[in-house]
Amino acid sequence: VGLLKALEESGSVSTLPSVSYFPLCFDCSTADTLRAFIAMFRLSKALSTVRHAVDKGVPSQDRLGVRPALEVSLMGLRSRLAHVMHEDIDNKRHRHRRRHSSKKGRSGKGKAHETQDAHETEAEHGEGEGEGEGEGDALPDLGSLPAPPMPHSQEWGLLCPLTGTPQTLSVSSAPLAQMVDDTQGTGTAMARDSPYGKAVCAAPFDALVAEGARVAQALRHIDTRLQYSISGYKNSWVIKPAGKSRGRGIFVSDDLQHICDQVGRPEETFVAQRYVERPLLVHDYKFDIRQWVVVSSLNPLVIWAYDTPYLRFCSTKFSLEDLDDPSIHLANNSIQKHLPEYGQDAGITGEGNMWDWDGFREWVESMGHAEYLKHMGQTQTEGQAEAEAEGGVYASPESLIKGLRHRMMEIIIASISCGRFDLTCPAEGFEIYGYDFLVDRDMVPWLLEINSSPTLEHATPLVTRHIQRMTKGLVSILVDTQRGLGVKTKARTGPAFPSIDAPHLESILEEGAPRDMGGWDLIYKESSKMTCLETAFGLKMGVTGTEIPIPPIEGQRHRHQPQHHSTHQTGQTGRAQL
C-alpha cells in the first residue's frame, strides 16, 4: 500500500511515469478506490474480449453466444476512447457554442436554419426516427458515430457479472449491490440506446470485429493505464493482503465477483494489481528477479544496486488455464519450497528453482536473434520492421540484457525518489530493500513490489554465496565510503547516474575513488543536500513566509514574541509546514 501511494504521486517527482513500469494497482480499502477498481476491471475485460476476437477469431457456431459480450465491450471501449481523447469535453463545448449562437441570432434565422439545427441535435442524441432500423437502409459507419455513454452496470453484467450479496463491505456501510450501482455514475442511461449502441447491435459480426480492432489499436497508443503490453485474454488480477510478506494470502483471479467477495472482508486490507499475462518464459517456466538495493543516505540521496540479481522460478510450466495453482504463478521461494512440484525439473530451473544473472545472460545469448524472436512470436524480418517503424535499432541479445539492466536501475531510482521522505531509514543509517521484477515478452521489466528488510535466509547455495559477498561489500559502503558520502563523482552539479553503455562505477566515479564494493554498484548520488523538495521539472516546493506569533492567553503575563522571517522547507518529512 505504501508503494502504491508513493507511485500515485510520482508525476511531480520523476519523469518516468509509474504506469510504464508498475502494473496498475488499487487499494481496495476505500469505497472510491474499490469503485475505480471495478470500473478498470470492466474496461480491461472489454479489451481482453475484443483482442481475443480480433487475434483468435470466433467460429461461426460460437458467434451467437459471444456477440452480447462483444457488443458491450465495444461500447465500453469506444466510450473510454472518447474520454481519453477528450471528445466528451469537445462535444459539450460544441453544443454549448451552437446553442448560445442560436439564441443570439434566432430572430434573424429562417425556418430552414432551425430545421437544420433540429436535425443535427437529433443526430447527436439519437432521436431521429427509424435511425439504423430500416431493412433497406445502409448501416452507418461505426467509426463516424459519436461515442456512447459508458455502459450501465446491467449491461456490464453481460461481460463480467457482479451481483449484490448480503455481505457488507468493510469500506462502506452499503452492501455490495449499492456499490455496483454507483460504479459508473451513468444513472439509467443505457449505452445500447445511443446511436453508436444501436449501430453496434445492428451491425454484422465481422463489422464488430473490425471496429474492435480499430478501437483497441487506438487505445493501445493513447490509454497507458490499460497497459496493453502486459494484458492478455483472461483479464487476471493478483490480490495481495497489505502488510504481509513471503507470499502469504496472495491469489490470482479473473472473477470479479470472487475478488469483491474477498476484498470486502472487514478484517483485512487488500490491494488488487494487474497480473502480467505475457511474461517472458524460460523453457516455459515463469520467473521473477530479486534485486538487492541499498539506500545509504536519504539526503543527499545515495543508492547502490547489487550487480548480480538472481532469478526465482515457478515449479510448474506457465499456463493461464489454472489461476488457482501457486506452483504456476507465484515464484516466491517461501511458497514454492513447500509445494510438491518444487525441484521436479531442477535440470532446467536450477537448484532451489534459482538462476544467477550470468545464467540468464547465457540463456538469452544462446538463443540468438532468430531463436529469440521465435520465442517472442516474431520472425527476424518482423522484428527488424517493428524496430524500424518505432524509430529504434534492431537489438542484439547482448544489448537486450544491457538495456534490461539499465531500465531496472531507472525504475529503482524513480521509485525511491517518489517515496524518499516516507522511508523509515534513519538520518545517519541505511536500509536494504528487495526489489522484485518481472520481465514481459517484449523484454521490458516491471516492478512487482519492494520488500523492506528482505529475508536473507540461506535458502539455497546460490543465495548463500551472494549473501556472503554482498554483506562484505555492505561493510565497505558504510565504513570505507562513509555511507557513500565520501565518494566523489564526475558530476559536479545534479545527480550522477551511469550511462547505458557503461552501467558500472567507472562511468560516474572520479579517478582514485574506491571501486571494489563487493558487488555493489553506485547507481545514483546527489551532489548536495536537498534543501526543499524539487519536482521532476526543477520546481522547488519550499514555502517562504512569516511566522505568526501565538497570542497570549488572557490572564497570563504578556510575553513579547517577535516575528521571524523564515522559509519552511520540506526537510525530512517532505511536507511544507504552513
Image (cartoon, rainbow, N blue to C red):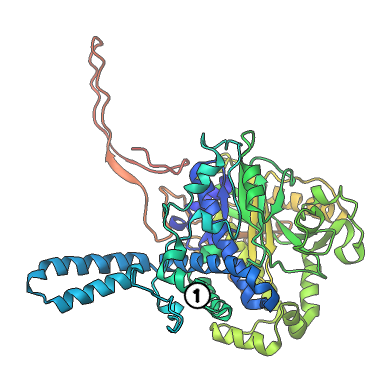
Does residue 251 appear left or right of residue 386 in this picture?
right
How far from the left and from the top, in percent, is residue 370? Answer: 75, 85
Mark 1 crowdedness (10 Å alpha carbons): few <14, some 14-19, many ≥20: some
Q: Is residue 64 visible?
A: yes
Q: Which quarter of the image is occupied by the N terminus?
A: top right
How far from the left and from the top, in percent, is residue 177? Answer: 54, 43
| Amino acid beneath label 1 | Ala
**Residue sitting at x 80%, y 73%:** 363
Q: Is residue 482 visible?
A: no
Q: Nearer the viewer, residue 252 or 74?
A: 74
Instruction: Judge whether 342 appears above or below 507 on screen.
Output: above
Q: Which quarter of the image is occupied by the C terminus?
A: top left
Instruction: Judge whether 426 appears above or below 139 on screen.
Output: above
**Residue sitting at x 79%, y 79%:** 367
Q: Nearer the viewer, residue 308 or 333?
A: 333
How far from the left and from the top, in percent, is residue 396? Answer: 69, 82
Circle 1 SS class: helix
Q: In the picture, residue 47 is in which quadrant? A: bottom right
Outermost residue toward the front in this view:
135
How far from the left and from the top, in percent, is residue 201? Answer: 51, 71
Outermost residue toward the bottom in this view:
381
Instruction: Judge whether 356 appears above or below 364 on screen.
Output: above
Q: Nearer the viewer, residue 141 or 413?
A: 141
Q: In the picture, residue 116 is in which quadrant? A: bottom left
Does residue 567 appear left or right of residue 292 in this picture?
left
Does residue 515 appear left or right of residue 574 in this picture?
right
Q: Write down the residue under mark 1.
A: 202
Instruction: Judge whether 452 appears above or below 306 on screen.
Output: above
